[in-house]
């Protein structure tokens, strides 16, 4: 009877890394001049802040409220963000 030895790489036995649960920035694929929806990842890219900073600033009123939800995923319309950036630029 032959004995077969199977070698398993050491990294195959490691547990997968936990995810942070935070949204990562993602550049929007549409212009703010077009009509469309922006998700939280797009807003993080536009404002140049982290997930935690964005939600802390939103709680303080620094960023506009969400325009709606698709299921449990929040979004803002491009018009809302365009107006907010224009107002922030005037101050």
Image: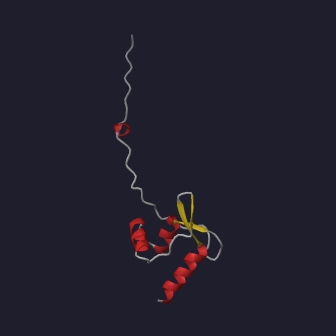
How has the structure been colored for display?
A: secondary structure
- Residue at 37%, 23% (x, y): give it: 5
At which x and y percent is residue 10?
34, 37
Residue situated in front as seen by the camera: 58 or 28? 58
- Residue at 37%, 36% (x, y): give it: 9
At which x and y percent is residue 62?
44, 78
Q: Is residue 26 visible?
A: no
Q: Is residue 7 left or right of residue 36?
A: left
- Residue at 52%, 81% (x, y): give it: 85
Q: Is residue 89 left or right of residue 56?
A: right
Residue situated in front as seen by the camera: 27 or 86? 86
Residue situated in front as seen by the camera: 63 or 20? 63
Determine which quarter of the picture holds residue 58: bottom left
Determine which quarter of the picture holds residue 48: bottom left
Number of callouts in the render?
0
- The correct choice, above or below, for 70 with respect to 77 in the image is above
Position of the N terminus by quadrant: top left
Q: In this view, which residue lies farthest toward the right?
A: 35
- The correct choice, above or below, for 52 with respect to 33 in the image is above
Q: Is residue 44 visible?
A: yes
Residue situated in front as seen by the camera: 82 or 71? 71
At which x and y percent is residue 20?
39, 55
- The correct choice, above or below, for 28 with respect to 84 in the image is above
Determine which quarter of the picture holds residue 32: bottom right
Q: In this view, which residue lies farthest toward the bottom?
A: 90
């Amino acid at each position: 009877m032959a004995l077969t030895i199977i070698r398993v790489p050491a990294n195959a036995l490691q547990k997968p890394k936990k995810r942070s649960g935070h949204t990562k920035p993602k550049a929007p694929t549409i212009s703010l001049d077009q009509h469309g929806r922006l998700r939280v990842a797009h807003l993080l890219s536009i404002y140049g802040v982290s997930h935690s900073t964005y939600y802390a600033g939103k709680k303080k009123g620094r960023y506009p409220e969400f325009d709606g939800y698709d299921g449990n995923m929040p979004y803002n319309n491009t018009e809302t963000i365009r107006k907010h950036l224009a107002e922030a630029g005037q101050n």
